[in-house]
Image (tube, rainbow, N blue to C red):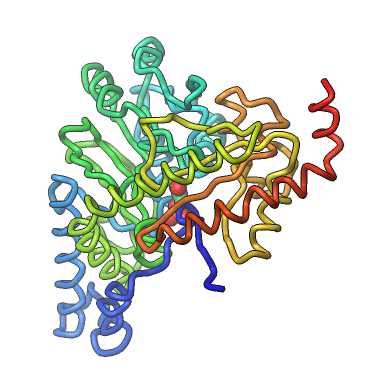
Amino acid sequence: MKPIYLDHAATTPTDPAVVQAMLPFFTRIYGNPSSMHAFGQEAKRAIEAARDGIASFLGAKPEEIIFTSGGTESNNFILKGIAASAGNRGNHIITSAIEHHAVLESCHYLEQGFHVTYLPVDRFGLVDPDDVKRNITDKTILISVMHANNEIGTIEPIAEIGQIARKRGVPFHTDAVQTFGHLPISVDELNIDALSASAHKFYGPKGVGILYLRRGTRIQSFMHGGEQERKRRASTHNVTGIVGFGKAVELAAEGMEKETRQEIFLRDKLISGILEQIEDTRLNGHPVHRLPNNVNVSVAYIEGESMILNLDMEGIAVSTGSACTSASLEPSHVLTAIGLPHELAHGSLRLTLGRATTEADIDRTLDVLPGIVKKLRAISPLYKKGKNK
Ligand SMILES: *Cc1c(COP(=O)(O)O)cnc(C)c1O
């Protein structure tokens, strides 16, 4: 049976057209883009073409795009770079409790010298813009709130948050790794000063990302060395990766709308199928302000890990909502932040659809999952206890 991949929030397959666009840059066009000769200049032209395409996709200027090694680096760059340039302008950063680890761990690191406010979210995972407003002080140097959450799919009100930040003259950064290439983004309409994106989350290659940085935003460079990227990010360009990023953006610009419609249709079918066919389940994240491809559910009385392993044996790849990445038994910080009790957080599943997901894939998942849940509940002591209450 054909394997079914429902883990697109973790990574997407590289589109064959992206691979094709990258290939010549491994072989024929191998020059260093910083070299003055023809070999180098041909590679440089390809990088600048990618940069132009990405900038216009965001409604930005080409010189506002900095190539990085991915979403993690872009997030580290903006937080540590702004902090390092703050001097005596301030020492306060505002972020949310449900950010990706690349933001949260950078903030934890910065707590050595900075004060960080981690805003709470409501039961759907939404940050309240009024909370942002209330917490800004004269010392606030950066506000960082993600565009959409990678676990529960909630889309944050970033235009409002950005507007509040702008009124107070505080730069606003958003981790848009889950939305870039999936939803339209205009940095001007959304009041964004800095944005992180990563190619492998929208059918590009792994190991390449961007930081969009609005002109005039003060930042210290993060990688020191050569003069690449206007001295803001040293190191020889990842030419193949950047070309792949550019091609993935082209494909996204063409196909995004249709893809979103298809994904929403399949997502909603999967959500209602699970909630209707399996008792004691709940949807995590916002019912409406939600990524088109994200399903996150809690299944009471059983462990997410056991469901994943059983689905995997059926050729269906999903992820736990509880993201026990470090093999620790701590439930996910996101599910905890929306107020889920530990038992429900541990029984969470994240299923994320993609460009190639078909209705047959969803039907098969809905055929298989209820049986797995039934089997696991039959041997779960929690289930018997819960049912006899
Ligand atoms: C995947 C992800 C990242 C990390 O991006 P990499 O390119 O894998 O380093 C950061 N933020 C969010 C929201 C993500 O989903």
Residue that appears at 15% across and 46% down: 60
Q: Position of residue 228 (x, y in %)?
A: 27, 62
Which image quadrant: the N terminus? bottom right
Q: Position of residue 337 (x, y in %)?
A: 57, 26
> Which quadrant of the view contains residue 202?
bottom left
Is residue 182 among what the camera can see? yes
Residue that appears at 64% across and 48% down: 370
Which image quadrant: the C terminus? top right
Between 387 and 126, the one lying in front of the other is 387
Q: Is residue 196 above or below residue 250?
A: above
Q: Position of residue 190 (x, y in %)?
A: 22, 32
Q: Position of residue 302 (x, y in %)?
A: 74, 40
Between 365 and 69, the one lying in front of the other is 365
Is residue 76 among what the camera can see? no
Q: Is residue 88 above or below residue 272?
A: above
Q: Is residue 190 above or below residue 232?
A: above
Between 238 and 276, the one lying in front of the other is 276
Residue furthest out toward the top = 134
Between 120 and 297, the one lying in front of the other is 297
